[in-house]
Amino acid sequence: MSTNKYELVNLDTGKKSTLQAMSGTVGPDCLGIAPLAKDHGIFTFDPGFMATASCESKITYIDGDAGVLLYRGYPIDQLATKSSFLEVSYLLINGELPGAKQLEQFDHSIRYHTMINESLLRFFNGFHYNAHPMAMVSAVVSSMAAFYHDSMDNNNPRHREIFAHRILAKMPTISAAAYKHMLGQPFVYPRNDQDYCANILRMFFAVPAEDYAVDPVTAQALDLLLILHADHEQNASTSTVRLAGSTGTNPYAAISAGVSALWGPAHGGANEAVLAMLEDIGTVDNIPKFLERVKDKDGHTRLMGFGHRVYKNFDPRAKIIRDMCHKVLARLGRTDNPLFELALRLEEIALKDEYFIARKLYPNVDFYSGLIYSALGIPRSMFTVMFAIARTAGWVAHWQEMIGDPAMKIGRPRQLYTGPTARDYVEIGKR
Ligand code: CMC
């Protein structure tokens, strides 16, 4: 705890309060503001949570100015090069890297929870073939609560653990079912002899009519993408999971709320929007004209995949993904990818442009992720679903951290009311 104390004086009444600063292990101090409401009857006003820490957490740390991202203290670049998505999920959820035996047990449990109830699978037939997969995933994840009454006591640590394994294991199966439904192809069941990413690729791309061999380069690239997207502290979807979860609702409902929040183009939907933008720009010659549109104060065009609420420097994940994009395209023999060339030039031009320099706008994780997903054969409408598969690890870790905290309170923000003051009801004939 910081020893810094801040004295607040109401200049009208002369009433004083002492606000105590709290220190984390790294990062800026936070001011405990509870006395403001108690002593002075005032609230703080911070739309978009620009300067508000909504909770205490030990999971992920970001230094936006330095471009640092740590999961449980481990730098993202080390995890990206040395770890695997399942190991990272274990780390995020349990706080420590697993030993060999622990990892084996975790991996085994995830492999053996991949199937979904056949009734749940039949839900997909209720969706139109062109339903957005995020709509299907969100609905089906929420519906999981109808299947596991026997293990949904939020106060029971074993139930929480079973939930964590179930949702991590079944998210790819649900996502693949959504994809197959869109294609009109038969659902491909998961196989327990396949690892996490190989299973995803099989369920997405295999068809009963022929054999399917998982390409190890593709599986490795996918694993890396999942690591990079696994958590990002109190982003919009994670905060949504926490807020929904703080009511004591079941965890499937909370994760489903997170999926819905992730869908928006300012958040997880950006990877889909980046490809649409690149296709819209078309050629390098059109970049200046496009950037003029972005800079037009009266317009609504943004350079998608650029800018971040926290990073005011390079998003460390964007650097890793850009390097990986080079490698993946080379190894898949697709070096002459015009959209990748366009993205590289767009980044180069934007980074030299005063508009982006002044606002500290750099490429974020989504600027290149869609290009890799495309190279891996994953269609654009599934990009945000891939993000959701990865972020499930983070959502679960945050839900577990919050539910396991004895000091947990329902999230209930206040407001600055600017509507009408009290007035009498007017009968309809007199309005
Ligand atoms: N293109 C053009 N201008 C931008 C952009 C952009 N991508 N991002 C921010 N700005 C401008 C914005 O117009 C504003 O300018 P001014 O001060 O003249 O009004 C200034 O920069 C500050 O922007 P802001 O909207 O107040 O910043 P924010 O922290 O609220 O928004 C953001 C962060 C990520 C929503 C925003 O940068 C954005 O919309 N980026 C494009 C969408 C995107 O790539 N999202 C993925 C984020 S990373 C993955 C994830 O979180 O899921």
Image (spheres, rainbow, N blue to C red):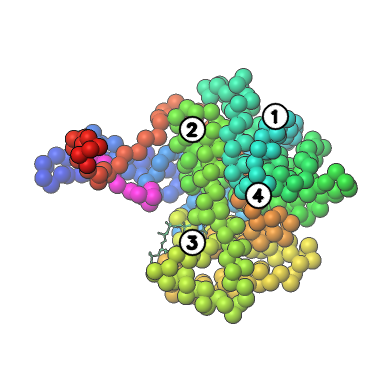
Task: Pick whichever, 254 or 301, lies toward us.
Answer: 301
Of circles 4 and 3, the one toward us is: 4
Q: Residue at x 53, y 62 (%)?
A: 304
Q: Closer to the N terminus: mark 1 or mark 4?
A: 1
Magenta stretch mostly in which secondary structure? Answer: loop
What's the residue type where badge 3 is placed? Gly
Asked whether disc 2 touches disc 1, contact meaning CB atoms under 8 Å apart, the reply is no
Kindly identify which residue carries mark 1.
Answer: 119
Question: What quarter of the picture does the C terminus occupy?
Answer: top left
Q: Which residue is mark 3?
A: 307
Q: Amino acid at mark 4?
A: Asn
Residue type at tag 2: Gly
Which element is circle 1 on?
helix
Q: Residue at x 73, y 33 (%)?
A: 115
Q: Position of residue 314 (x, y in %)?
A: 52, 62
For marks 2 and 4, give the CA distance. 31 Å
Which circle, 1 or 4, is nearer the viewer?
4
Separation (CA) of disc 2 from disc 1 = 26 Å
Q: Which residues are magenta?
A: 42-51
- Distance CA(mark 1)–CA(mark 4): 21 Å
> From this viewpoint, which residue is outermost toward the top?
150
Query: Which residue corresponds to the image point at 75% horizontal and 51% vertical from the top-left?
Result: 219
Camera sees residue 169: no
